[in-house]
Amino acid sequence: MKAKAIVSLSLRQRGEGWGEGPNTFTVQAHRLTDTPVLAIADERVLKLHPQVAKALAGKATLVSLRAGERAKSLKTLELLTKRALTLPRKLTVLAIGGGTIGDVATVFAHTFKRGVGRLIHVPTTLLAAVDSSVGGKGAVNVAGAKNVLGVFHPADETWLCPEFFTTLTEAQRREGRIEAWKMVVTLDAKRFAQWAKAAPGDDELVRVARALKHAVVAKDPYETKGLRVVLNFGHTLGHAIESLSHFRVRHGEAVGLGMLYALDVGVKTGVTPGAVAEQVEAALPLARGARQQLAAWLAPTNRAALRELIRADKKDGMILLRRPGSWVMTKGFGP
Ligand SMILES: NC(=O)c1ccc[n+]([C@@H]2O[C@H](COP(=O)([O-])OP(=O)(O)OC[C@H]3O[C@@H](n4cnc5c(N)ncnc54)[C@H](O)[C@@H]3O)[C@@H](O)[C@H]2O)c1
């Protein structure tokens, strides 16, 4: 399969490590001289991209996982630990997959024998490329609550291998696009105006979103200065919807609904001018029927459960938008 070039990914970023990309996985794996290597890979990716297992043959212990929120569990950590038990601490962990594989692999890398030698992310979804493989957060879900056990452990390298993105569905791409728009809406007014006029290609989306997120994370790596919270725009309600749906509503989709909700709360509380909310809503690459879905999730019968889930989700309040590129953190979770 011919890989669509994601041409603009040669940007290097300090502090997070950045591979020599864009390169195919086979080329990147060829550079891998470390031993030993534990590769934690999405089973679907292994099926769709057989060159991955081929490139790792004889170089890595390969563990295949079914992706999805259920992979972000204590059970997966136990399984990975058992598979790696005899490997030394100075281990390279290669996380090949979307955000769920990346998140659980990050927790494993941080905790296995008190921290492995190297962590390399190979994001295979757009969402992982624009967001979850940047910034060092990893987490697992416990008792149905999202990301309640987690760590900060930045990747030493990220390999952006364009061939993986060719097998994503339109819905999967939309999830990544939503997270990228989240960065631009909250952090970059000029880019928002440009993108609202002409929607960017996915390569630009990845490049810009990673750079914006990296800039925030560099100033607040451990979320102690109140700057990283901006990355939660849309996530307060989004995470609660994901949990309430037992993760049937996918992360990017739920964040899209959460962003709509944050715009509504912003308008109702006088923080977001109505015209700004309309402009942002029109620009966001939301799924058809998003408004109706949001209304259904906010039905009175769900309110108490949503409130409880939000409380369990480490959030002190919500990010509201004043205008593109300007945000405020409010106490409370909406009217
Ligand atoms: N750590 C962070 O900072 C951070 C940030 C944002 C999101 N997240 C987390 O990321 C997760 C969502 O990530 P995701 O949407 O990538 O989820 P995912 O890992 O479940 O992947 C989504 C689906 O895409 C499939 N897939 C993966 N690569 C593919 C490919 N190349 N071709 C075809 N199918 C492919 C997977 O098998 C899965 O079915 C959530 O758990 C969220 O909480 C973490």
Image (tube, grey):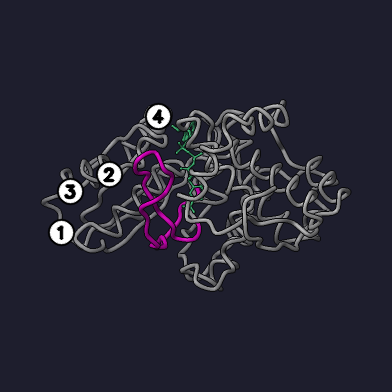
Residue 84's disc is 3
Distance between the alpha carbons at the discs numbered 4 and 3: 22 Å
Amino acid identity at mark 2: Leu
Amino acid identity at mark 4: Arg
Q: Position of residue 126 (x, y in %)?
A: 56, 42
Numbered disc in front, either 3 or 2: 2
Q: Which of pointers 3 and 2 lies earlier in the amino acid sequence?
A: 2
Q: Is residue 94 above or below residue 165?
A: below
Q: Is mark 4 within 8 Å of ligand 1?
A: yes
Residue 74's disc is 2
**Residue in front for this viewpoint, 278 or 15:** 278
Distance between the alpha carbons at the discs numbered 1 and 4: 28 Å
Amino acid identity at mark 3: Ala
Tell me which segment is drawn in magenta. Answer: 134-160
Secondary structure beneath disc 2? Answer: helix
* Disc 2: CA contacts within 10 A as few (<14), some (14-19) or many (>=20): some
Residue named by callout 1: 88
- As for residue 289 lying within the magenta part, the answer is no
Residue named by callout 4: 44
Q: Which of pointers 2 and 4 lies earlier in the amino acid sequence?
A: 4
| Left or right for 161, reference 30 | right
Amino acid identity at mark 1: Pro
Q: Residue furthest right?
A: 275
